[in-house]
Image (cartoon, grey):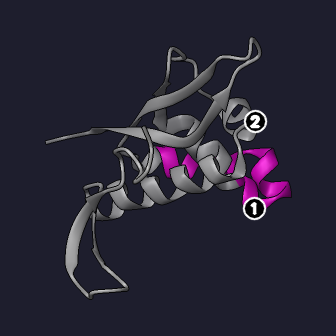
Amino acid sequence: MQTEFAFRLPRGYVDGSGQVHREGVMRLSTARDELVPLRDDRVRENPAYLSVVLLGRVVVRLGTLTDIHAGVIEDMFASDLAFLQDFYRRINAEGHTRAQVTCPSCATAFAVDLAGERLGES
């Protein structure tokens, strides 16, 4: 059973030294991962903070960083946060990172891997 999933952030996390980290790994969430943040004072004061604390628990690596916590997630670009929220939902609800999509022009259905490279990236 696969419990860890690789991803590539759209923009990347910029650390204190200016290094950009885009490649990462997220593990499957446990019941504890979803319950512990509910006791966090930051989440009690602002329920929107729940995803930040939760992602800080399940992202196990980001580039060369292995100490991922809510503070790291807080400092990400909004597009990367949205990507991680969607990625979390996909791997925990569906168990994979592939999604069925349909081309709006020709109506052809195909699968895309949300963890991989984005179209047009080099």
Quadrant location of the C terminus in the rendered image: top left
Percent from the top left, x then y, of residue 7?
Answer: 40, 40
Quadrant location of the N terminus in the rendered image: top left
The magenta stretch spans residue 92 = no
Seen as rendered, the residue at the extreme right is 45
- Judging by the rendered image, the residue that carries numbered circle 2 is 75
* Residue sitting at x 37%, y 85%: 104
Q: Residues within 10 Å of mark 1 (few under 14, many from 20)?
A: few
Q: Main secondary structure of the magenta part?
A: helix
* Residue sitting at x 47%, y 38%: 58
- Judging by the rendered image, the residue that carries numbered circle 1 is 47
Closest to the observer: 92 or 39? 92
Relative to 41, does residue 12 appear above or below in the rendering?
A: above
Q: Residues within 10 Å of mark 2 (few under 14, many from 20)?
A: few
Q: Is residue 65 left or right of residue 4?
A: right
Residue span colored magenta:
33-49
* Residue sitting at x 37%, y 44%: 117
Amino acid on which the number 1 mark rests in the picture: Pro
Amino acid on which the number 2 mark rests in the picture: Asp
Closest to the observer: 16 or 91? 16
Percent from the top left, x then y, of residue 23?
Answer: 45, 30
* Residue sitting at x 49%, y 44%: 33
